[in-house]
Image (cartoon, rainbow, N blue to C red):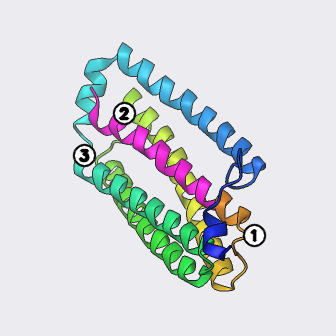
Amino acid sequence: MSISAESRRVAPGHLPGDLAMWFFILAELSVFAILILAFAVTQALKPQLFGESRLLLNTSTGLAMTLSLLTAGLFAALAQEQVKRSRPRHGAVFLLMALLAGSVYVVLKLTEYRHLLASGLGMEHNTFFTLYWILTGFHFLHVLLGMVILGWLAERCRRGLYNVANRSGLESGVLYWHMVDLIWVVLFPLVYVLN
C-alpha cells in the first residue's frame, strides 16, 4: 500500500488531534456560548438600542474579516493535507499563507477598534458596545493565540517534524484555528448584521 493511500485511510472512530485539545475546544466553546447567549438575550430586551448601535459598525469590514479568517482556515486545512501526502515543507508554505490571511483579520480588527475608540464608542458607551468589546475582544485574543500556533506549526513543518504517522500536534493546532473560524462565523451575523 502506498503512503498516500495509507494516509487517506481513516481508522474507525478516530478523532483528529489530541483528546486534550477537544476538551479545551469544548470548554472554550462553552464560554463563547454563554457570551453569545448574553448578547442575544440583551438584544431581545433592547432591540432599538442594539439596532441603532449596530449601524455604527461597518458591515463590509466585518465581512472582510470573515473572509480572511475562512481563507486562513482553508490554507491550514491544505497544509494538513500536504503533511498527509508526505510533503511537510509544502504544508509549511500553506501555514505561512494561513498566517498571512489571519494577519489581515488582525489589521482590520485593530483598525476598527481604533476607529470606534476615536468615535467615543468604547466599552462604557452603552450595553451593545459593552458586549461588543467583550465578545470581539475575547475572540481577538483567541485569534492572536491561533496565529502563534500557526507560526509554530509552520516551523515544525519546515523542519519536517510532522509526517503521515506523526501529525497529531498539527491536527490539534488546525482544530484550534477552525474553532476560531467557527466562532467568528457566529459572531459576524450576530454582532454586525442581525436585528
Which residue is at 44% across, 27% downward? 39
Mark 2 and mark 1 lie on one chain; the one further toward the N terminus is 1
Badge 1 amino acid: Asn
Badge 3 amino acid: Thr
Q: Secondary structure at mark 2?
A: helix
Q: Is residue 64 magenta?
A: no
Secondary structure, magenta segment, majority class: helix
Q: Is residue 58 visible?
A: no
Which residue is at 42% across, 38% downward? 186
Q: Which residues are magenta?
A: 173-195
> Vertically, is 189 above or below 161?
above
Q: Which mark is residue 59?
A: 3
Kindly report the distance in space between the C-alpha atoms of the residues bearing marks 3 and 1.
42 Å
Q: Would you identify the image quadrant in which residue 109 lies?
A: bottom left
Q: Is residue 187 magenta?
A: yes
Which residue is under mark 2? Answer: 190
Which residue is under mark 1? Answer: 166
Residue 78 in picture, x, y percent from top left: 49, 68
The answer to whether residue 24 is left or right of residue 111 is right
Badge 2 amino acid: Leu
Of badges 2 and 1, nearer the viewer stands 1
> Could you tell me if the residues under marks 2 and 3 are in contact, i.e. CB atoms within 8 Å?
no
> Vertically, is 127 above or below 159?
above
Kindly report the distance in space between the C-alpha atoms of the residues bearing marks 2 and 1.
39 Å
Which residue is at 67% across, 57% downward? 172
> Could you tell me if the residues under marks 3 and 1 are in contact, i.e. CB atoms within 8 Å?
no
Where's the N terminus, which quadrant? bottom right
Residue ranking furthest to the front: 1
Q: Residues within 10 Å of mark 1 (few under 14, many from 20)?
A: few
Which residue is at 53% across, 73% downward? 95
